[in-house]
Image (spheres, grey):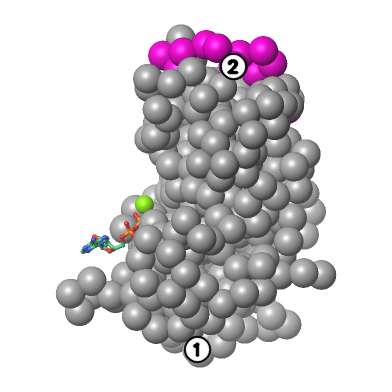
Amino acid sequence: MSIDLQAEHVGKQYGGQLAVKDLSFTVERGSFFSILGPSGCGKTTLLRMIAGFLTPDTGQIQIGEKAMNGVPPNRRPVNMVFQHLALFPMMSVGENVGYGLARRGLPRAEIAKRVGAMLERVSLPGMQDKRVDQLSGGQRQRVAIARSLVLEPTLLLLDEPLGALDLKLREHMKIELKQLQADFGTTFVYITHDQSEALVLSDHVAVMNAGSFEQLGTPQQLYYEPQTPFVAGFVGANNRLKGRAISEQEGLLAFTTEQGLTMHARTMGRIDHGQAIEAFVRPEAVSLARHAAELPAGYPSHAGQVQSLLFDGANSAALLRESSTRTEFRIALPQTGRFADLRIGETVAFSFDPQHAVCFAATGTSANAS
Ligand SMILES: Nc1ncnc2c1ncn2[C@@H]1O[C@H](COP(=O)(O)OP(=O)(O)O)[C@@H](O)[C@H]1O
Ligand SMILES: [Mg+2]
């Protein structure tokens, strides 16, 4: 396994404020690596240090196993794609894609050949002579990526490249980006604040918060095995419950929520009796039924009143309040249409497997469910 990017103790501050704190990580050759975090957490600062536009205060960066200390951006085997793509509006598509090759002094015939082949691969065959302003938003983004990939960088750095596109196009470009990366085999380092983009696209994701990585893992690990309250709150949707620990048995913690509801969840890390906790229950981990007897056997069941129905096709959910304590829960509705006639105010039963809920000692810094 080769490593295309290695960061060791990389840190950066602006006027005494740490923007990136002592980060160490590696990115494998040919992988799609994302850095996911809220606005202001230091993603762009980190990417600019990798690209060479900013110098780290501490630590060092290696690309393709070469130390990059003092290497200027144009000497690094790296290209960058931005949210507001900087295509040259006065140049044709072909001139845009061939720009870097021309600067490298390649012969015109060779440039034309490579540009033609690249446009085919990004599904813009024969578009060399089009003007940039004749293209749609998605086509422009493909030109921007083609312009970078034609230079065969070791790393392609992408800074929220889909952020300026509308939702439908973003969904489409997600799939296209993933296919392009698989097709070219170029190592991608992708930054985004959108957890769905990170989950869909990546082999590995680092969840970043306030300049540090909270967790680095596969999308499945982040979703099923969040290691911190921040990750549990930021990746996927989650019901977040605050409460106090009562007792622990075989890795399951009994706790009481602030509203007085007793529940169980898998213990993550050490939690002492009486300690403040935060528990997370995914909407899609909760079962819903008209009557408690219809719920899967073996888990504590609760009654709740439907407060609102959020119909959104396959992502539909109901907001309930648990009957005795008024604790609010978001519960995913099954796609079978079994609850298509659910009404606001109706009383239903719900339960979840405590193994599918997680519980942490409270830190007070977790992200809100998104
Ligand atoms: N040139 C700068 N000078 C001072 N502070 C900056 C500068 N660039 C970014 N920051 C600050 O550093 C932090 C991280 O910013 P940034 O890396 O842009 O985050 P992100 O890309 O995750 O939104 C923020 O608090 C931001 O305000
Ligand atoms: Mg940014």
Residue under the image location 70 percent in, 36 percent down: 180
Q: Nearer the viewer, residue 299 or 99?
A: 99
Residue 33, horizontal then vertical, whole percent: 62, 57
Residue 50, horizontal then vertical, whole percent: 48, 64
Picture layout, residue 349 above or below residue 188: above
* Mark 1 secondary-structure assignment: loop
Residue 367, horizontal then vertical, whole percent: 40, 60
Residue under the image location 54 percent in, 36 percent down: 102
Q: Residue 273's mark?
A: 1
Spatial CA span between label 2 and label 1: 68 Å
Q: Is residue 128 left or right of residue 23?
A: right
Q: Which residues are magenta?
A: 121-133
Picture layout, residue 282 above or below residue 314: below
First in sequence, mark 2 or 1: give its number: 2
Picture layout, residue 306 above or below residue 70: above
* Mark 2 secondary-structure assignment: loop
Predominant secondary structure in magenta?
Answer: loop
Is residue 230 among the parts visible in the rendering?
no
Q: Residue type at mark 2?
A: Gln
Q: Residue 128's mark?
A: 2
Q: Nearer the viewer, residue 239 or 200?
A: 200
